C-alpha cells in the first residue's frame, strides 16, 4: 500500500491526511492491489468463455507511482502487465465504470498502473529503461517524447528495426538532455496500444531545479471503451476511424473516484502554497481545455520549454492537444475549500454514454485545501468516491 494520499508528486502522507481530517479518517484499503498476473503468450483478443471469466481475476491497475531515477542508479524496468482499470468502482454518479482489460506498465517490483509510473530524472543523466515483455503476448516498444536519443533507441519498430517480441527484454538508453515534462508510450500499433493504456509521464528536472511548495503530475485521456472490452472477449466491434469516446479520465480515474485520496489524484494544497501542476495529454485523439475553479494560473512550461515571462500571463483555462504537455503554476490564495479542476468540454465531464450520461463525472478532479478536509462536504465527497471516513 502506498503512503501517498494525493496526486503523484509532493508527498502528502496518511498521517497528514488523518491530521487534516481531524482524525475522522479510517485506513481504507482501496489502494492495495494483488500481485500482477502474467498474460499467456497465445494469439489475439481473449474470446473464449474461460478467458472472459478470467478478466475479473486480473489485478486492478493502480494510480501511477513516482519513480526517482537518480535514487536507483538511473535504471528502471518497465514490465508489461495485463490488468483491469477500475475507473469509478462505486455506484454513485453514474458508476460503476471499469475497463475490463488494459495493458499496464509496472516499474521494477511495483504495481501495474494506468497511466504508467511517472519517471523522474535529472538533466544530464543517462537513463537505462529495460522493457520487460517476458510475460507478454504481443510485441511492444517504448518511445520517449522530447529528448534527443540515438536512432536505435527511438522506440519505433518501422524505422529503427527494433521491437520487443513476447518473451523478450530490451534496454533503451535515454539521455535526460531536454529539461521539462514529456511523455512516453508504446509505439507498436500505436493506435491500439495507447488506447489500451500503455502511456506515462517522463519528467526531466533542470539543473538547480526549485520545486514548488506543492507539485503534482496529471495525465488526461479519453477512451473508447469498446477496444478494452473487445480484448476482454466481449461481443463488440471497434475501429479507430469510427472512434467514439465514452470514458474520460485523470490519472486513470473519473470523478468522483479522482477525489479518492489513495486511488485518485486530488490536488491537496494549503492556503499560501505555490502550486505547480504538470499535465500531459498522451491520448492520441482529443484536445482537453483544462479549467481551474477560483484560481488563475500562469502557463510556465509547454512541451518541455520554459516559456518567457511575457507569455506567462494569468488565465484559468489551457487547451492541451494530443501529446502536448502543459505546466501551470498558481498560488493557493482562495478561501479554503474544495474547487473543481476539469476539462471544459462539458460532455467530457460526464460518466456514461448518450441518454445515460451522468453529470458530473469524467475528466474532473479537485483542488482540495487541507483546511477544508474536516468538513461535512468533504466527508460527503469521500462517500461518493468510495473512501470511508
Image (cartoon, rainbow, N blue to C red):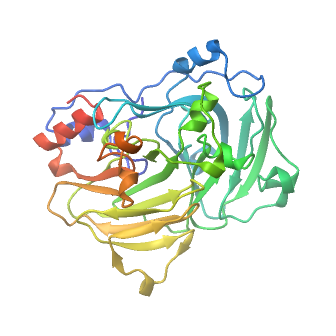
Whole-percent x and y of residue 106? Answer: 60, 35
Can I make out residue 301 in this image? yes
Residue furthest right in the image: 161
Q: Is residue 337 left or right of residue 325?
A: left
Query: What residue is drawn where x is 71% and y is 53%?
Result: 143
Whole-percent x and y of residue 343? Answer: 38, 58
Image height of 280 relative to 16, above or below: below
Q: Is residue 231 left or right of residue 307?
A: right
Q: Residue 253's quadrant in the figure? A: top left
Q: Residue 354's quadrant in the figure? A: top left
Whole-percent x and y of residue 6? Answer: 35, 45
Q: In which quadrant will I find the N terminus?
A: top left
Q: In which quadrant will I find the C terminus?
A: top left
Residue furthest top in the image: 50
Can I make out residue 374 in this image? no
Image height of 140 relative to 316, above or below: above
Q: Is residue 274 left or right of residue 126?
A: left
Image height of 290 relative to 49, above or below: below
Residue furthest bottom in the image: 310
Residue furthest front in the image: 355
How many numbered markers are drawn? 0
Q: Nearer the viewer, residue 345 or 33?
A: 345
Query: What residue is drawn where x is 66% and y is 43%?
Result: 193
Q: Nearer the viewer, residue 361 or 23?
A: 361
Q: Nearer the viewer, residue 260 or 193?
A: 193
Whole-percent x and y of residue 202? Answer: 58, 55
Amino acid at each position: 500500500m502506498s503512503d501517498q494520499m494525493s496526486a503523484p508528486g509532493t508527498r502528502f502522507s496518511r498521517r497528514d491526511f488523518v491530521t487534516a481530517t481531524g482524525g475522522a479518517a479510517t485506513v481504507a484499503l482501496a489502494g492495495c492491489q494483488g500481485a500482477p498476473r502474467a498474460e499467456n503468450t497465445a494469439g489475439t483478443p481473449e474470446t473464449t468463455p474461460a478467458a472472459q471469466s478470467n478478466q475479473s481475476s486480473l489485478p486492478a491497475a493502480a494510480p501511477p507511482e513516482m519513480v526517482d531515477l537518480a535514487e536507483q542508479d538511473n535504471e528502471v524496468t518497465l514490465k508489461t502487465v495485463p490488468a483491469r482499470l477500475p475507473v469509478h468502482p462505486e455506484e454513485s454518479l453514474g458508476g460503476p465504470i471499469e475497463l475490463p482489460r488494459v495493458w499496464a506498465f509496472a516499474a521494477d517490483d511495483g504495481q501495474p498502473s494506468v497511466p504508467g509510473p511517472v519517471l523522474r530524472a535529472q538533466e544530464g543523466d543517462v537513463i537505462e529503461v529495460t522493457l520487460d515483455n517476458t510475460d507478454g503476448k504481443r510485441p511492444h516498444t517504448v518511445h520517449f517524447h522530447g529528448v534527443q536519443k540515438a536512432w536505435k533507441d527511438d522506440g519505433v519498430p518501422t524505422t529503427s528495426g527494433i521491437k520487443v517480441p513476447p518473451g523478450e527484454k530490451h534496454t533503451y538508453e535515454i539521455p535526460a538532455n531536454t529539461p521539462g515534462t514529456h511523455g512516453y508510450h508504446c509505439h507498436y500499433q500505436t493506435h491500439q496500444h495507447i488506447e489500451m493504456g500503455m502511456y506515462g509521464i517522463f519528467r526531466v528536472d533542470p539543473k538547480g531545479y526549485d520545486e514548488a511548495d506543492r507539485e503534482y503530475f496529471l495525465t488526461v485521456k479519453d477512451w473508447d471503451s469498446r477496444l478494452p472490452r473487445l480484448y476482454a472477449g466481449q461481443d463488440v466491434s471497434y475501429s479507430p476511424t469510427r472512434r467514439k469516446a465514452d470514458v474520460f479520465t485523470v490519472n486513470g480515474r473519473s470523478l468522483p473516484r479522482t477525489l479518492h485520496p489513495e486511488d485518485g489524484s486530488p490536488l491537496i494544497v494549503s492556503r499560501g502554497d505555490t502550486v505547480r501542476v504538470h499535465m500531459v495529454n498522451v491520448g492520441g485523439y482529443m484536445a482537453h481545455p483544462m479549467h481551474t475553479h477560483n484560481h488563475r494560473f500562469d502557463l510556465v512550461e509547454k512541451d518541455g520549454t520554459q516559456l518567457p515571462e511575457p507569455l506567462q500571463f494569468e488565465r484559468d483555462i489551457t487547451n492541451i492537444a494530443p501529446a502536448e504537455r502543459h505546466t501551470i503554476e498558481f498560488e493557493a490564495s482562495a478561501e479554503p475549500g474544495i474547487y473543481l479542476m476539469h476539462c471544459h468540454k462539458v460532455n467530457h465531464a460526464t460518466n456514461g454514454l448518450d441518454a445515460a450520461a451522468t453529470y458530473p463525472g469524467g475528466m474532473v478532479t479537485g483542488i482540495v485545501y487541507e483546511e477544508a478536509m474536516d468538513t461535512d462536504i468533504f466527508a460527503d465527497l469521500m462517500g461518493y468516491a468510495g473512501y470511508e471516513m
